[in-house]
Amino acid sequence: MGISKQSIEDLKNKSKISDFILSSTTGKLRGNKGMALCPFHGEKTASMSFTDEENLFHCFGCKEGGDIFKYIQLINNVEFQDSVEIAADKYSFNLTYTDSKFETNQKNLIDQIKKISDFFTRNMNEVKSTEALDYLKNRKLDGEDIKNYKLGFAEKDEKKIIQYCKTNNISDADFKKLGLLSEKGNFLFKNRIIFPITNFRSEVVGFGGRALEDFGPKYLNSSESSIYKKNRTLYFLPNFLKDVKKHKFVIIVEGYFDVIAFNKLGFSNVASPSGTALTIQQLNQVSKYTDEIYLCFDNDQAGIEATKRIVEIKNNISKDLNIYSILLPSKYKDISEFYESGEKNIDNLISDKKDLVEFCIDDLIEKEGESDKKKIFSAYKKFSNYLSPLEKDLSIEYLGKKLGINKETLVNELSFKEDLITTTINQSENVEENKHIETFKDIFISNLIKNKFELKDNEKELLELNIELNEQIKAIKSNLDSTENDKYNNISFSEEQLEEAIVRLILFYSELKIQYLINQIDLSKDTSLFPEVEELKKNMEYYQNTL
């Protein structure tokens, strides 16, 4: 089932590629054009150009490029149709699908999976599995909870559900479409407690299952289907949206029982990515309802790392989010254990939440050891790459207070280490592989020959940047009749292409010169070279803004 071409074109005309680029990487937009750090390869100086007028992007470093949908595909690691749907979600655009039966098929699948969900819930009540009920009782859940949260049970013997499906005209093909069969064609859920996963319209779209025996994975989710997209769907309970509106924040937890634990403690504004890592798409979904996000992941190293990872993905959301971490007492591994132990004082935990960036800095200091300030700051530099300018400023102030170092000293250290010593980009490390630079050089040299080597100001500036290029031009000028120079006579280009070639060469050779000067600083400690580096960087910024 596809999306109509006209619908895709209409969406592209309504969209702006800058909305997605500037929310996922650092860059500047001047009018309809911009430059940004390419998120697809490591670099310190912007080499990716983009334009809202044509909704295109191109990186001069790694050669990646394409339209707005290609960018969304790459940045989110999704298929083309998913990228179109992500853009449509952002602009509230109603897509037109080529298959007129699509909506009918979707409705049929929703109806069928609802019947299967009803079977699981009746099974829990009628079969009364001693093992399942005992397990839930140990998790401090009673019959009323089972009913309210619509918990189900899948028996070990699948004969009953096979018969039920035949009676209700649900075929094996339908089972497969619903994501309920394994790759080998076997029913996924056997001897498991079943959690129905719903969309925001309260329609069941998939299931999670908790095993009651030590065989196979402890938790298992439905396979991907046309109604259940794992990277976009969250597990939550019936009063979720109502409680989000009431509290004005969302709590994100790891698993199914964590969601239930918060509900039992009085908070229904809680959701889980169903035991997997929280995705950009899931974070984007909840950000439609609030910009306040509280994280309460497991109280172990994996949970801490999952919390820190949110710093890396949050800037891919177009909306500014305020994200905090709920700090559990160290004796509890997760919120489920907190609830099951009989604890009730959840309000204090929520009110004592920690700003996400501050949480990450605290963990960094604890991990590296407070006495080793150099190691801490080295780790902080890597972490700060994911922060916005304001977040970075506030985080430096917080780090300084924690380490007993004044903010100005930290800012100077960060500026020296980050802006000077690491000022280089992938192109300067891979000069021979950069075919674009050779193309720009050919255009530049061809134009010089046509103009009999009369130099404009920016061309003089270019030749002053690199001795080798200067010598190459002199050699060509002194030996114009050489057959080696014939290739320059057949190069065609527009005035705009010439201007871009000169600017790109200035940027490229400026980067090489900066790297050379930095190496000299490292070797000789000659700080008198700092002003020249700074002047080159300012000049580069000027030329970047002309592209």
Image: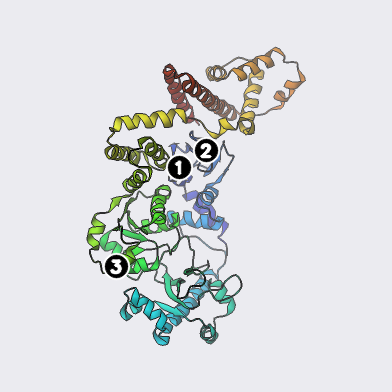
Image quadrant in which the N terminus is located:
bottom right
Q: At label 1, which amino acid type do we have?
A: Thr
Relative placement, left or right, of 192 versus 489 is: left
Q: At label 3, which amino acid type do we have?
A: Tyr
Q: Residue tagged by mark 2?
A: 48
User: Is residue 495 visible from the viewing direction of this image?
Assistant: yes
The quadrant where residue 246 appears: bottom left
Q: Are marks 2 and 1 in contact (CB under 8 Å)?
A: yes
**Separation of residues labelled 3 and 2 (CA atoms):** 50 Å
Q: Are marks 3 and 2 in contact (CB under 8 Å)?
A: no
Q: At label 2, which amino acid type do we have?
A: Met
Q: Residue tagged by mark 1?
A: 25
Task: Using the image, determine if residue 115 lies above or below residue 208.
Answer: below
Q: Residue tagged by mark 3?
A: 339
Q: Nearer the viewer, mark 3 or mark 2?
A: 3
Task: Using the image, determine if residue 183 lies above or below residue 406.
Answer: below
Task: Using the image, determine if residue 390 lies above or below residue 185.
Answer: above
Q: Are marks 1 and 3 in contact (CB under 8 Å)?
A: no
Q: Earlier in the sequence, mark 1 or mark 3?
A: 1
Q: Earlier in the sequence, mark 3 or mark 2?
A: 2
